[in-house]
Image (spheres, helix red, strand yellow):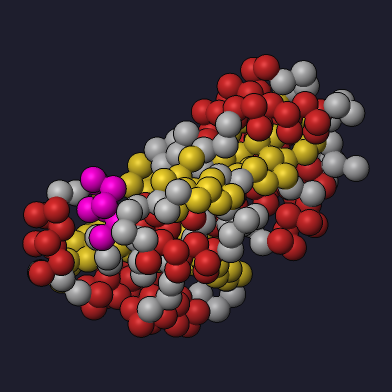
């Protein structure tokens, strides 16, 4: 029996097989579309959510899990004396980790909460390392340095090619949205310490593909190899498929996992966005 149990949220893109193998508890985020509430991955599939989002005039509203939801689960999991390690999406994208922190303070058992500083598969890399530590019989205290080491070897990029959701969500003005659409402006962003920063902006998806040719060369020069690649998308398109082909050719030994983004990430990123997450091997 593992020395501790693991909790995460539905943004972290774990496969059903991984969840089952390691006994990971996943707390879902919720989203409201056209006045109907859906729980991520439970009452709606990701392709279904994407279709509804594309057809909705208003931007879906995502909600973090309630503190009480975490508290109930923590008390259930620690009732047998087990510790809990709870790893979540960066607080810059969701208040989920804050709800978890509040619940941990009130839980009957010992709960350690971590902000992964990432989302999607980049967060999953940390969760899977923690799960391996638990399976090996390590304590939470012994696992934390290994989880941190994985975080330090993780890179996350995201390509935003359709600004419609950003306009709907008020992140950019309608006028700027029209201008960038007319000029066919696309953006590649990089997540650093939980915050998204602009990597490049360019006209058309060719600029994005070219940037990934450069990123691949940069990774080859700086690191020994790529251990794993996560590809999280809001519907694959020609440009994202081009990037995937390039990655497979450049890093044939890397474990590659492709999935739809979670509902909350879809809402932020918009149609045809794709996020590339790399777990690197150090030289």
Residue plotted at (55% across, 78% down): 252
**Residue nearest the viewer, comparing 190 with 17:** 17
Q: Is residue 6 visible?
A: yes
Q: Within the magenta stretch, is there residue 159?
A: no
Which SS does the magenta portion mostly show? helix
| Left or right relative to 252: residue 132 | right
Numbered range of the magenta stretch: 164-171
**Residue nearest the viewer, comparing 219 with 139:** 139
Q: Is residue 119 visible?
A: no
Residue 145 image offset from top left, x and y in percent = 63, 36
Furthest residue in direction front, as rendered: 35
In the picture, which quadrant includes the N terminus?
top right
**Residue nearest the viewer, comparing 77 with 271:** 271
Residue plotted at (64% across, 43% down): 27
| Left or right relative to 138: residue 246 | left
Relative height, residue 104 to residue 88 (above, below):
above
Q: Within the magenta stretch, is there residue 168?
A: yes
Count up the numbered dots.
Answer: 0
Residue plotted at (73% across, 29% down): 72
Residue 93 image offset from top left, x and y in percent = 41, 42
Relative height, residue 101 to residue 158 (above, below):
above
């Amino acid at each position: 029996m593992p020395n501790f149990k693991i909790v995460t949220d539905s943004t972290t893109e774990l496969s059903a097989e991984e969840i089952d193998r390691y006994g990971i508890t996943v707390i879902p985020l919720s989203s409201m579309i056209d006045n109907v509430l859906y729980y991520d991955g439970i009452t709606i599939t990701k392709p279904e959510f994407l279709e509804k989002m594309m057809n909705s005039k208003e931007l879906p509203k995502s909600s973090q899990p309630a503190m009480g939801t975490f508290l109930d689960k923590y008390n259930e999991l620690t009732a047998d004396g087990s510790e809990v390690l709870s790893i979540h999406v960066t607080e810059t994208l969701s208040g989920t980790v804050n709800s978890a922190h509040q619940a941990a303070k009130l839980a009957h058992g010992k709960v350690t909460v971590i902000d992964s500083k990432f989302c999607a598969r980049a967060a999953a890399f940390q969760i899977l390392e923690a799960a391996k530590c638990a399976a090996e019989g390590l304590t939470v205290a012994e696992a934390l340095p290994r989880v941190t080491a994985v975080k330090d070897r993780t890179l996350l990029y995201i390509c935003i090619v359709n600004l419609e959701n950003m306009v709907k969500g008020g992140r950019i003005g309608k006028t700027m949205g029209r201008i960038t659409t007319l000029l066919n402006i696309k953006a590649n962003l990089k997540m650093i310490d939980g915050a998204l920063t602009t990597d490049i902006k360019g006209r058309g998806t060719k600029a994005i593909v070219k940037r990934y040719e450069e990123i691949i060369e940069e990774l080859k020069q700086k690191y020994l190899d790529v251990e794993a690649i996560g590809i999280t998308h809001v519907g694959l398109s020609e440009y994202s498929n081009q990037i995937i082909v390039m990655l497979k050719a450049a890093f044939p030994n890397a474990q590659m996992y492709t999935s739809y983004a979670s509902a909350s990430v879809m809402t932020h990123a918009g149609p045809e966005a794709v996020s590339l997450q790399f777990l690197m091997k150090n030289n």
